[in-house]
Each structure stands twice: as C-alpha cells, then as structure tokens.
C-alpha cells in the first residue's frame, strides 16, 4: 500500500514537472505565447477572485443604499404625517375659536336685548306715571280722581323708576342717552369676553 502510494506520488510529481517544463518551453518559444498566458492568468484571477469580491461589494452597497433610502423615506413620511397633524390641529383650533366667539356673541346679544327691553319698559312706566300725574281725570286704584302732582310725589316714586340725571332731559332724550350708554357697555363687555378667548391650541398634558 505504502509502496503503491510512493509510486503514484512519484509518477504524479514527474508528470507535473514534465508539464511545467513543457509549458515553460512553450512560453519561451514565442513571445505571443507569454501574452496569451498572461491573459489567461488575468482572466482566471478576474473570474475566480476579483468577480466574487466585486459582487460582494456591490451587494453590500445595494444593501446600504436600500437601508438609507428606507430611512429617508421614513423621515419624509414622518414629516408629512406631522404636517398633516399640525394642519388638522390648526383647523380644529380655528373651529373652536369661531365656536367660542359665536357663543359669546349670541350670549352678549341676548343680554343686550333683554337689558334694552327692560330699559324701555322702565321708561314706559315713567311715561305712564308722568301722564297720570298731569291728568286729573285719571283715577287711582280706589276709583277717585288723582290729585295733581306735588313736589313730594316724585320723591315717593319707586327707586327703580327714578332717573336723577334724566330730570334735566326729556324722557325721549333720556331714553336715547340710556340706550346709547347701554349699547356702549354691551360693546365693552363683548370685547372683554372676546379677548378672553384662547387663540392658541391647548398644550398637551405631560
């Protein structure tokens, strides 16, 4: 067995040496053979060594590029989502502000109309009282004619129907002045309530 292996190895070595010797003779026989051999060596290097490395490098670069593109796309999508959310929040806040302002306007207008109606009713009572005081034919609740108004009767009128500042004016002029004052006060109240509306969105609770 060992002898057979030695003979085989010896024969193989002799074959290799003879092949190398023949190849060397072939290379030296013509310079074009050397060029062909060099090209063959380069092709083998390119095919078995360079190509696999280049393929691995290209695959690595493609993987990196894909990951970078995915990260960039994720950033863009996150930005678009944040922009859409900000737009939605701004629209919701604007709608809230409009709703609060409309509620304030309706409430203040209702209050103004109620106060104006009460003011005009008060002046109507004043007109009726003055007309009764200057008309002796109008009877009192007991059915007797009322006496002409005396300086003391005006002081006996209910406090809510007295307008001390209006005595220098006619009732119509006093009513106009009172309506204008009421309108100005209602406008002031409306402006104050509108200025209290929060225009910025509420900060989320942490």
Image: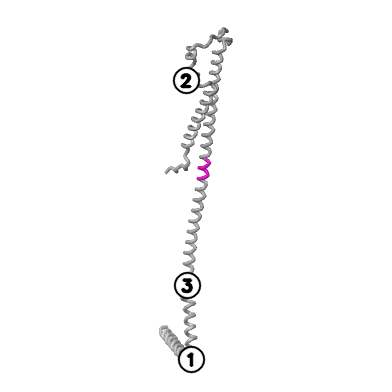
Q: Is residue 105 above or below residue 124?
A: below
Residue 54 got which mark?
3
Q: Is residue 2 above or below residue 68?
A: below
- Boundaries of the magenta span: 90-95
User: Is the image coloured rainbow, by chain, by secondary structure, or in one colour?
Assistant: one colour
Asked if residue 91 is among those painted magenta in the image, a careful observer would answer yes
Q: Residues within 10 Å of mark 2 (few under 14, many from 20)?
A: few
Determine contact: label 1, label 3, CB under 8 Å: no
The quarter holding residue 142 reads: top right
The residue lying at 50 percent from left, 11 percent from top is 150
| Earlier residue among tags 1 and 2 | 1
Residue 104 got which mark?
none
Q: How far from the left and from the top, in percent, is residue 32?
A: 49, 89
Spatial CA distance of label 1 from label 2 is 137 Å
As drawn, the residue found furthest toward the bottom would be 29
The residue indicated by pointer 1 is: 30
Q: Is residue 78 above or below residue 178?
A: below
Determine contact: label 1, label 2, CB under 8 Å: no
The residue lying at 49 percent from left, 12 percent from top is 153
Q: How far from the left and from the top, in percent, is residue 128?
A: 56, 16
The quarter holding residue 172 reads: top right
Q: Secondary structure at mark 1?
A: loop
Spatial CA distance of label 2 from label 3 is 105 Å
From the image, which quarter does the N terminus lie in?
bottom left
**Labels in figure, total:** 3
Front: mark 1 or 2: 2
In this view of the protein, which residue sits in the foreground, 195 or 197?
195
| Earlier residue among tags 2 and 3 | 3
Q: How far from the left and from the top, in percent, is residue 38?
A: 47, 84
The residue indicated by pointer 2 is: 164
């Amino acid at each position: 067995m060992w002898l057979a292996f030695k003979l085989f190895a010896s024969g193989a070595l002799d074959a290799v040496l003879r092949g190398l010797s023949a190849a060397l003779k072939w290379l030296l026989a013509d310079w074009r053979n050397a060029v062909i051999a060099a090209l063959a060596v380069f092709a083998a290097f390119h095919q078995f060594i360079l190509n696999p490395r280049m393929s691995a490098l290209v695959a690595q670069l493609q993987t990196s590029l894909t990951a970078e593109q995915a990260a960039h796309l994720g950033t863009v999508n996150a930005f678009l989502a944040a922009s859409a959310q900000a737009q939605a929040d701004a629209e919701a806040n604007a709608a809230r502000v409009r709703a609060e302002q409309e509620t304030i306007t309706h409430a203040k207008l209702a209050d103004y109309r109620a106060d104006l109606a009460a003011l005009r009713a008060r002046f109507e009572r004043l007109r009726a009282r003055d007309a009764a005081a200057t008309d002796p034919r109008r009877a009192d609740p007991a059915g007797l004619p009322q006496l002409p108004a005396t300086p003391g009767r005006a002081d006996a009128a209910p406090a809510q129907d007295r307008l001390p500042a209006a005595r220098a004016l006619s009732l119509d002029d006093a009513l106009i002045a009172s309506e204008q004052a009421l309108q100005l006060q209602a406008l002031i109240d409306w402006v104050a309530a509108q200025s209290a509306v929060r225009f910025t969105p509420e900060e989320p609770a942490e």
